Image (cartoon, rainbow, N blue to C red):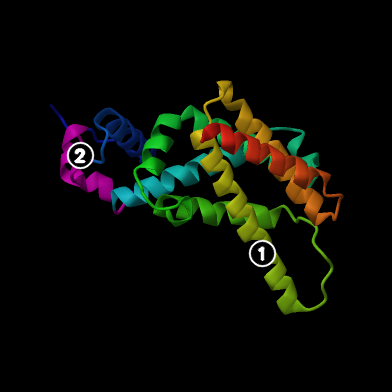
Amino acid sequence: MAKKKNLNKNNIITFYMDYVLEHGQNPKSVYSFAKHNNFEESKFYEFFGSFENIEKHIFKVFHDNTISALHKSNEYSSFHSREKLLSYYFTFFENLTANRSYVVYTLNKHKNSLKSFKALTALKSSFTQYINDLDIELLDVKEEKLNKIQNKGLTESAWLQLLLTIKFWLEDTSASFEKTDVFIEKSVNTSFDVLNIAPLKSLIDFGKFIFKEKVKMN
């Protein structure tokens, strides 16, 4: 049988995701992976240096697809930063849910915390850039060094919030992951309420929700 010639990056990603879901493990080698999918090994290296690179790229694709979908909406550009971030979350987790089996496999095969997952490094870079582009209003600090610290704190806390939401979604067994939707709404709104120095009601409400759901899951 003739080898497949006209491969692109998306073809290889699809082959990889199908392989790990069908076999419950990563391919043993690039050679065996290429042979399994009937293409030349050299074609793989035109797009990726390793399977680890594919995993990183896949999570970035989830982000890129989310941004693409948001910008197709006529309303999105008129949203304030809070509404934009909520829209991002709901769309991003729709993408994850559409590929849940793969995401669960990839993240659960590691024993370390989500924060250390190499597969999420490209996602982190793209997501933190997105947070910076939202122009979220912070305290008006005149000192440049303090501004940098404040901005760094915002992006790191936003990234941690996304990781916590992914972890909650991984453990969510509710129909249509409706509890994750509640988690997203409460966590994002709470974050903006804190930035706006709003009353602590949202914080307390969110804390009660996390405690109640954690008790149920345990």
Instruction: Provide residue 61's location: percent of width, then percent of height.
Output: 48, 42
Q: In this rendering, which labeled residue sits more in front, label 1 or label 2?
A: 1
Report whether 135 appears left or right of 64.
Answer: right
Circles 1 and 2: CB atoms closer than 8 Å: no
Residue 35 in magenta? Answer: yes
Residue 70 visible in image: no
Which label belongs to residue 153?
1
Tell me which amino acid carries mark 2. Answer: Ala
Tell me which amino acid carries mark 1. Answer: Gly
Q: CA distance from mark 1 to mark 2?
A: 43 Å
Q: What span is in magenta?
A: 27-49
Q: Earlier in the sequence, mark 1 or mark 2?
A: 2
Which label belongs to residue 34?
2
**Residue sitting at 32 percent across and 38 percent down?**
12
User: Farthest residue toward the left?
Assistant: 1
Of the pair 99 and 77, the residue shown nearer to us: 99
Of the pair 66 and 170, the residue shown nearer to us: 170
Residue 130 visible in image: yes
Report whether 175 appears left or right of 20.
Answer: right
